[in-house]
Image: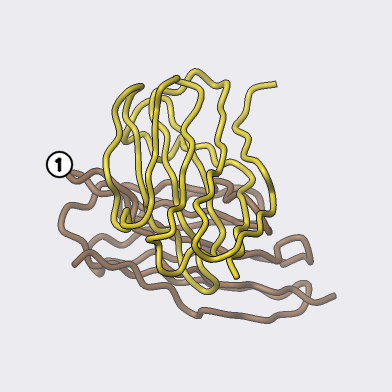
Chain colours: A brown, B yellow
Amino acid sequence: EDKVVQSPLSLVVHEGDTVTLNCSYEVTNFRSLLWYKQEKKAPTFLFMLTSSGIEKKSGRLSSILDKKELFSILNITATQTGDSAIYLCAVDLDGGSEKLVFGKGTKLTVNP
Amino acid sequence: DGGITQSPKYLFRKEGQNVTLSCEQNLNHDAMYWYRQDPGQGLRLIYYSQIVNDFQKGDIAEGYSVSREKKESFPLTVTSAQKNPTAFYLCASSIRFGRFYEQYFGPGTRLTVT
């Protein structure tokens, strides 16, 4: 069974801290890994990763994929209260069963 | 403004009643999806439609039904057969099926059944 596991499930930090969110996966036909940010309502797309070792960066957020060890991390530096959200990791499958398999998410709370 | 809308935001129903959740997009996307999200859980796929007049079951289709009579619209009916209907329902669309990185999500409908 295809599986995506995120850790930690919940995290509370202070503004200015750096956080690392983890996503590991066991799937049959990997195509890409996606990160989303969900604040109350609709998830918004952050990154898509397809190749190992290539860091994707957007402002204070960055992410990298390790296809050998089957995991990805999402880093947020100098956190702000606006970073408080649920961060979802999903794996896009290929090979005739195209769909996204989501992890349970990491709930990040950034306190002032 | 192009986008995807869901209505209503909050919906309350009595057990045993069917309820239909609306999803409309004006992005000219071929593919549309329905997901369910429970507290502390990721999104799970209920149904998807690759093109108008076509739809397929996702991982948790039991107790749900859909239609895709128009490209813009993909309503979801939660039937009385769905054992645990209380959840947050998200609709999404993408220009074609499989382009998940280009998937747009609606704002969601929170359904409470008592």
The chain identifier of the residue carrying mark 1 reads A
Dividing the image into 4 quarters, which one contains the N terminus of chain B?
top right
Q: Quadrant of residue A89?
A: bottom left
The percent position of residue B43, horizontal first and vertical second, equals 44, 59
Please provide percent x and percent y for residue B52. Answer: 36, 22
Q: At 60% across and 72% down in the image, what residue appears? A: A107
User: Is B110 placed left or right of A90 in the picture?
Assistant: right
Above or below A28: residue A5: below
Asked where in the image residue A26 lies, by quadrant, the reply is: bottom left
Q: Is residue A24 left or right of residue B114?
A: left
**What residue type is disc 1 on?**
Gly
Residue A88 located left or right of residue A101:
right
Q: Residue at x 56, y 29 (%)?
A: B24
Residue B65's place in the image compared with A84, above or below, is: above
Tell me where residue B74 appears, x and y as whole percent.
46, 33
Question: Is B35 placed left or right of A11 in the picture?
Answer: left
**Can you identify the residue that label 1 sits on?**
A96
Crowd tier of the residue under label 1, counting other residues whose Cα lies within 10 Å: few below 14, some 14–19, many 20 or above: few
